[in-house]
Amino acid sequence: MKILIGTHNRAKTKAVQAISSIYYPNAKFENIEVPSLVSDQPLSQEETRQGAINRAKHLMEDTDALFGIGLEGGVQEIDGQMYICNWGALVTQKGDVFTATGAGVPLPKELAEQLLGGAELGPVMDVYTNKNDIRHDEGAIGVFSNGLVNRSTMFEHIMLLLIGQFEFANKPK
């Protein structure tokens, strides 16, 4: 059984493998970089969700995989405050689409201003933290939750929600 992952991002891959392996211990994983067909920095829940769906759907074109997983990080503004938002999508061979969202925390105003100016959160966080490739490890969620939740564990929660929906939809009635 094969499970496709629509990214090479280490944090996202770790989350998909950690949770999927519990429910599908014989699964083989394949990472395929696929387009989100949304902005490099999604600026709304809707755009972020659509990016995850687009990635997962693209994975399932001409494949025998059990399902494809698209995970997308973005931001959204609520009452003048910018928040991290994250979405996942699981798409099956039959074309069924399951979606779930994850945790969000507010971003400092100076970071939000950069994002609204066209910057992408990953590189902005690298400068902010003086680290490289933070998006592959703790991510912004890890920084602003003081390390209590990192990007991988945040996406693990989304994976639990996706697999739970998939299993519920496929259990005998």
Image (cartoon, helix red, strand yellow):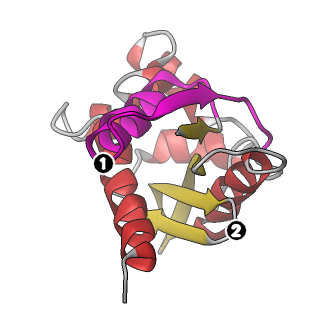
* Residue 104 in sight here: no
- Where residue 44 appears, x then y in whole percent? 62, 64
- How busy is the neighbourhood of tag 2: few (under 14 within 10 Å), some, or many (20 plus)? few
> Which mark, residue 140?
none
Work out whether residue 76 or residue 94 is closer to the camera in this orientation and state it: 94
The amino acid on which the numbered mark 1 sits, given as a three-letter code, is Tyr
Work out whether residue 114 or residue 13 is closer to the camera in this orientation and state it: 13
Residue for point 34% across, 27% down: 138
- Where residue 131 appears, x then y in whole percent? 43, 10
The amino acid on which the numbered mark 2 sits, given as a three-letter code, is Lys
Dot 2: what SS? loop
- How busy is the neighbourhood of tag 1: few (under 14 within 10 Å), some, or many (20 plus)? few
Q: Earlier in the sequence, mark 2 or mark 1?
A: 1
Residue for point 32% across, 56% down: 160
Left or right for 70, reference 94: left
Q: Spatial distance from mark 2 to mark 1, Cα to Cα? A: 20 Å
Up/down of 2 relative to 76, above or below: above
- Location of the C terminus (image quadrant): bottom left
- Where residue 70 appears, x then y in whole percent? 61, 48
Residue most extreme to the bottom: 173
Residue for point 74% across, 50% down: 60
Residue for point 34% across, 66% down: 164
Q: Quadrant of residue 114?
A: top right
Bounds of the magenta segment: 7-35
* Residue 40 in sight here: yes
- Where residue 85 appears, x then y in whole percent? 47, 56
Residue at the spot of label 1:
23
Q: Is residue 70 magenta?
A: no
Residue at the spot of label 2:
94
Work out whether residue 4 or residue 78 is closer to the camera in this orientation and state it: 4
Work out whether residue 38 or residue 34 is closer to the camera in this orientation and state it: 34
